[in-house]
Image (cartoon, rainbow, N blue to C red):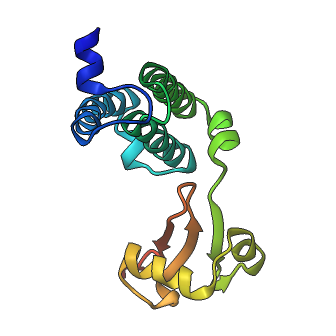
Amino acid sequence: MDTMVKIFGEGKNLSALQMSARGIAVFFIALILIRISGRRSFGIRTPLDNIVVVMLGALLSRAIVGASAFIPVVAVSFITVVLHRLLGSLIAHSKWAGKVIEGNKIPLFKDDNFLRKNMNKALVCEEDVLQGVRKSVLTEDLHKIKAIYMERNGEISAIKKEVETK
């Protein structure tokens, strides 16, 4: 036990080497936690996914600097990723849970008109919507656009009108 205290230290009075040792340990613990949490944490980026990333960063930093006891921090981090995984699974298997936890997409443009009420609800302006259109369908010509949405993860996406063939 004395060897562990020499390597990792105790409390807030840590040497640079002890904090570095904790940093290395936390790096590998975080890697394991992210593998448990799943790719969703860094891929989809919904509010739920952002919560787990922010919480893990805040929690694990406390273990590195000695602001909280190491083992309880790792335990609550583990609980956080397991909860994230459970909620992610619930969202994947239940439309109702997805709506409750992550919300619905918000239509921002339809029938050649901006939906101002929805834009206000989504806290976006015309330029924000146009930026999303440029990124998702590579055009600024709204006459080519059928609909624009703010997705559940906050991204703006657009659907092109179907081209008539003769």
x%, y% of residue 100? 70, 40
Instruction: Pinpoint residue 143: horizontal percent, then vertical percent.
Output: 52, 89
Q: How many marks are shown on the rendered structure?
A: 0
**Nearer the observer, 166 or 88:** 88
The location of residue 127, given as percent across then percent down, is: 55, 88
In front of the other: 97 or 63: 63
106 shown above or below 40: below
Which quadrant of the figure contains the N terminus?
top left
Q: Residue at x 43, y 19 (%)?
A: 71
As drawn, 136 above or below 62: below
**Where does the C terminus fall, quadrant-wise?**
bottom left
Image location of residue 73, percent across then percent down:
47, 27
Q: Which residue sits furthest right? A: 117
Position of 42 with respect to 156 (left or right) is left
- Quarter of the figure with residue 12: top left
Residue drawn at x 55%, y 43% is 48
Residue located 44% across and 90% down the image: 140
| Vertical comparison of 14 with 126: above or below | above
* Left or right of residue 132, residue 48 in this image: right
